[in-house]
Amino acid sequence: MLQAFNAMMKRDLLLAFRHRGELANPLLFFFMIVTLFPLGVSPEVVLLRKIAPGVIWIAALLAALFSLESLFRSDFEDGALEQMLLSPQPLSVLVLAKVLAHWLVSGLPMLLLAPLLGLLLAMPERAIAALELTLAIGTPLLSLIGAIGVALTVGLRRGGVLLTLLIMPLYIPVLIFATNAVTAAAAGMPIAGQIYFLASLLVLALTLAPLAIAAALRISVS
Amino acid sequence: MWQFLHKMASPKYFYDISGKWIPWLGGLTVITLLAGLYYGLVKAPPDYQQGESYRIMFIHVPSAWMSMFIYVLMAMWSGINLIWNIKLADVMTVSSASLGASFTLLALVTGSLWGKPMWGAWWVWDARLTSELILLFLYLGYIALVSAIEDRRTAARAGGVLILVGVVNIPIIHYSVEWWNTLHQGPTVTKFDKPSIHLSMLIPLLIMAVSFKLYYLTVVLMRARTEVLDRERRSAWVRELFGAKPAS
């Protein structure tokens, strides 16, 4: 089982690196959305500092959705997904490997880019550290929850907008706890509570989401 | 009991028996609705603080209850459908969705009408309002998914997964939002000790709640009947029902 997990992850990572151009797209998207806010709201530092956690997190949320959309698409189109369904290995494990590989190439780079964005929005250092921490716990959570929606819409031609409609409401707790932690950190307050909450959500998603993704895939591919 | 449930799962039996129930359920709905409205709007005393305007509660609170109740019911039916593969369960889920969404919308609209005189604003980003709004989004997402998938059975099963994921998430969403911001008055009926609402207001409220449930049952059965007919339109009993010749 572990072998299958590793093989699947290696394959997905390899595929991702063969299409290097596509790797940068979600990141660019993330960056651009954040850039729009000073332009659209105001370049005033006090205001930017105040809205920064929310802006960066909402941008991360949208970028996650945007990049997730193609998670199963090529596998669905070339039939690899059907082979995964037929394989004797548990589908939920294979799916978890795919989601993890996807997070490594899309979520992790966002983590690296976020401090820069924090500086652009004049966030204090404490808050940037908290932002990193929440993104480290939160982005895998976004990938896991989002993958359920992707699995449900994989067979549909115009799944993109629909995916957003299905998944956005489920992202709300992550958004609330993460931005709250960053805001609290900026004010110099402890953030352990929010972080524990996010971490417990991540554990919950790690255990339950692969099962839901597998079930959804079986339904939409059949 | 089991035999009855077993029989209910057959579309034809369901179609026949629900047809007999609907007039009764509809009649009871009208009676309880009239009684509830009479006691609520005429008999119940005005509130010492909110005056007459609290009376919108008799619509607002039952519809908010219904909005959550229907979601849980849909989750139950989806579970039944995914586990035992009973067609009728998914017919019920699909037929409930738009009713649930309507009740959620009704709760939001009446809440906003009530909020204007009480809080001085049509909308505040309060925890319960926000979670109700998110619930509406969940309903609309479900409806969008089901209508995007052409095959009815696949649509219902995919929707079922979404509903079950949603039902795990609803408490999380609710508490995260509650923790985020709260202005709404606390629950006054479901507290474990004595309800903090006077009996003369509680009774019409409960009558209205029963009436809303009956209304839901009536309409969901009507919708489910239509859905059953549509799905079974090629089967012999439907053709016979409408006087067409059996399929050759």
Image: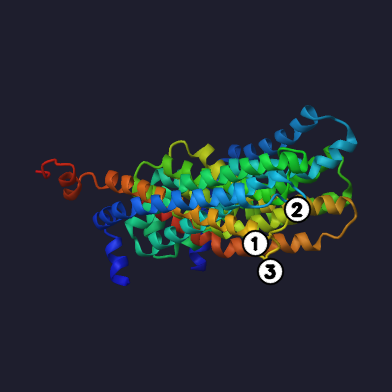
Q: Give the mark nearer the N terminus: 2 vs 3.
A: 2
Q: Which residue is drawn at 25% across and 58% down?
A: B13
Q: Which residue is drawn at 32% across and 45% down?
A: B226
Is A166 displayed left or right of B196 in the figure? Answer: left
Circle 3: residue type: Lys
Q: Which residue is labeled 1 in the image?
A: B199
Disc 1 on helix, strand or loop? helix
Quadrant location of the C terminus of chain B?
Answer: top left
Vertical comparison of B114 with B202: above or below: above
Comparing B31 with B59, the one in front is: B31
Q: Give the mark nearer the N terminus: 1 vs 2.
A: 2
Chain for disc number 3: B
Q: Which residue lies furthest to the top in this view?
A: A39
Mark 2 nearby-residue class (10 Å; few <14, some 14–19, many ≥20):
some
Chain for disc number 1: B
Could you give the CA–CA distance between mark 1 and mark 2, rounded to whole angstroms?
33 Å
| Tag nearer the camera, 1 or 2 | 1
Percent coordinates x, y for residue B233 in the rendering: 23, 44
Q: Which residue is labeled 3 in the image?
A: B194
Percent coordinates x, y for residue A36 in the rendering: 74, 30
Disc 3 on helix, strand or loop? loop
